[in-house]
Amino acid sequence: MERTNLTGKAGTRPEAVRVKITADSTCDLAPEILEKYNITLCPLTIVCVDSNQSEREFRDGIDITPADLFKMVDTEKKICKTAAPNIFDYEKIFAEYSPKYDSVVHISISQGFSSSYQNACIAADEFRNVRVVNSFNLSTGSGYLVHQAGIMAEEGKSAEEICTELGKIVLQMNCSFIIDRLDYLHKGGRCSLAKLIASKVLNIKPCIEVADGVMRVGAKYTGKFEQVLEKYVKDRLTAAKGNIDLKRVYVTHTMCSPEVVEMVRGEIVKYADFEEIIETRAGCTVSNHCGPNTLGIIFRQIGEYK
């Protein structure tokens, strides 16, 4: 296995001409993008625990949808956890595609968020032509890399060329999102009870930023969700103005209303002339940690993002 972290350089061998792209389900790309570029996902697992401590497992995006998950948590009062694919899960995917392609490039959620990357690397060690890329991101922050890898594979680029380009993009992703409710973060142990209570009293909606493979709290907004999103979009795009790759921007959300998404689209065009504005819905893994009414804009920022 040839392992790729930032640079994408791994060994020396003849360049491949047929490359298969695989990724973790946490890349949150729309089905039509996955189908168009023949991208195969390895699903993470959602473990739901009821009041009797009985557990039931679901495959992200296959056996369970975000709507199902929110019903279990909000209505049925179940506790849901996420689990990475195990080594065998990755081995099955790599074993299927490794013989059919010159190379397989797998793009993983950041190793700072999950053991997925480590498990994929261990599995890939059994195959001569599988490379694993640490996206240092999540949701469409990693999905941008997966999408770009699919485009390059379709163009006939080699695995070496794809991984080298992804190594550049990793350093340039501007990924953030606004969380309307902090109770899901609290249930997952990522928000204290005191902060949860304060957020409700003060109507605080934090901006969570992803950088260097970890999440951090950025600006803290107050007010109604729609008003916060207007300010958030303006802040993110004006702060990066002049350094934005205008090829595409993703609007990724957890079951926000069509009206909210359309409003965000309208705000985006005020500040940046993107060639594409791509709407995509976050899967169950991200939804389980962030809850409903979470929305982020994700784009590539030329030069290193701090």
Image (spheres, rainbow, N blue to C red):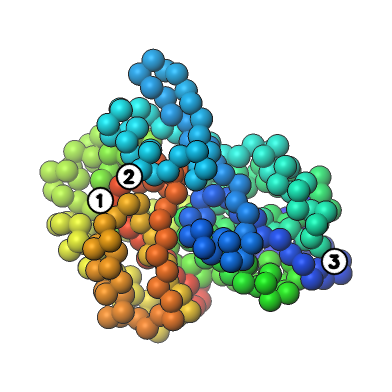
Q: In the depicted view, which residue is nearer to us: 221 or 250?
A: 250
Query: Compared with residue 55, is residue 156 higher up or lower down, i.e. above or below?
Result: below
Query: Compared with residue 40, is residue 250 higher up or lower down, i.e. above or below?
Result: below
Q: Quadrant of the C terminus?
A: bottom left
* Residue tagged 2: 291
> Looking at the picture, how far across and down is residue 213, in whole percent?
51, 55
Quarter assignment of residue 12: bottom right
> How busy is the neighbourhood of tag 3: few (under 14 within 10 Å), some, or many (20 plus)?
few
Q: Reading the chain from its start, which is encountered first: label 2 or label 1?
A: 1
Residue 48 lies left or right of residue 59; in this view the side is: left
Q: Residue placed at 68% from the left, 66% from the top?
A: 163
Q: Reading the chain from its start, which is encountered first: label 3 or label 2?
A: 3
> Looking at the picture, how far across and down is residue 91, in whole percent?
73, 42
Residue at the top extreme of this rendering: 52
> How busy is the neighbourhood of tag 1: few (under 14 within 10 Å), some, or many (20 plus)?
many
* Residue tagged 3: 12
Type of amino acid under label 3: Thr
Q: Residue placed at 67% from the left, 60% from the top?
A: 21
Callout 3: SS: loop
Q: CA distance from mark 2 to mark 1?
A: 8 Å
- The numbered mark at residue 180 is 1
